[in-house]
Amino acid sequence: NAGVTQTPKFHILKIGQSMTLQCTQDMNHNYMYWYRQDPGMGLKLIYYSVGAGITDKGEVPNGYNVSRSTTEDFPLRLELAAPSQTSVYFCASSYPAHYEQYFGPGTRLTVT
Amino acid sequence: QKEVEQNSGPLSVPEGAIASLNCTYSDRVSQSFFWYRQYSGKSPELIMSIYSNGDKEDGRFTAQLNKASQYVSLLIRDSQPSDSATYLCAVNPTGTASKLTFGTGTRLQVML
């Protein structure tokens, strides 16, 4: 199993552009999450999903959108990128009721 | 008050010593607790989970939970330079499905 995979690994985005961060898991986990991590600020939950077709906001959802059409994929969309969205983005997944989350390798995004 | 608090460190210990990492949390009825290790530039890796009061041992790692004091700790015995990383404490607050709240992490340095 590859676990949780994310693409791209790095990206530079211009202010006002949009892009989609990809996340795929092959562990048949129902629950998936998107976090951002800024230096010294810990992990902040952006959006999460408890299954295909079901998504909900986390702590810092503004400026982002998600969709979940399959169990495996949970893309994160950035619309009208701003410098404040410069961060490292992690996708994670878990079984329901296990709570143990497994993380992908991350995407380092710079908005200039 | 932060929901999950950790000392940012760095915590410096000599090789072969016991490293003790501490975490306090504010939600008195939280049920699930996790320790993640994060090397610089990498994603968080789950190393321990604990759900009931007392100690849980896995190799050189021991997690300790005291729900009355709202305190969870991680002991690393025979610390090695490869243990040098940031350790994140995560808590599943009550009523949040499988969402986790993360502390900002403690940086551990194991000195030769």
Image (cartoon, rainbow, N blue to C red):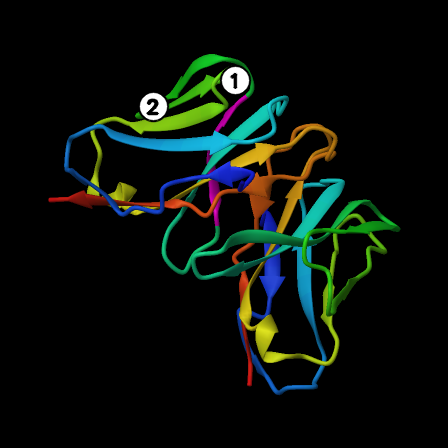
Tag in front: 1 or 2: 1
Say which chain tag 2 marks: B
Total marks shown come to 2
| Residue at x-position 63% and y-position 21% | B29
Whole-percent x and y of residue A100? Answer: 60, 34
Whole-percent x and y of residue B71? Answer: 45, 24
User: Which amino acid type corresponds to the residue marked 1 in the rendered image?
Assistant: Lys
Q: Secondary structure at mark 1?
A: loop
Mark 2, other Cα within 10 Å: few <14 / some 14–19 / many ≥20: few
| Residue at x-position 37% and y-position 31% | B22
Mark 1, other Cα within 10 Å: few <14 / some 14–19 / many ≥20: some
Q: Is residue A31 above or below residue A44?
A: above
Judged from this view, the residue extending furthest toward the front is: B1
User: Which amino acid type corresponds to the residue marked 2 in the rendered image?
Assistant: Gly
Of the two numbered discs 1 and 2 on the same chain, state the one appearing first in sequence: 2
Q: Is residue B69 magenta?
A: no
Which residue in the structure is indicated by mark 2?
B59
The residue lying toward the viewer, choosing from A66 and B69, is B69
Judged from this view, the residue extending furthest toward the right is: A53
The residue lying toward the viewer, choosing from B6 and A26, is B6
Quarter of the image for the N terminus of chain A: give it: top right
Say which chain tag 1 marks: B
Residues in magenta, as a range: B44-50
Quarter of the image for the C terminus of chain A: give it: bottom right
Which residue in the structure is indicated by mark 1?
B67
| Residue at x-position 56% and y-position 19% | B51
Q: Provide the major secondary structure of the magenta segment.
A: strand
Q: Is residue A66 above or below residue B82?
A: below
B21 sits to left or right of B102? left
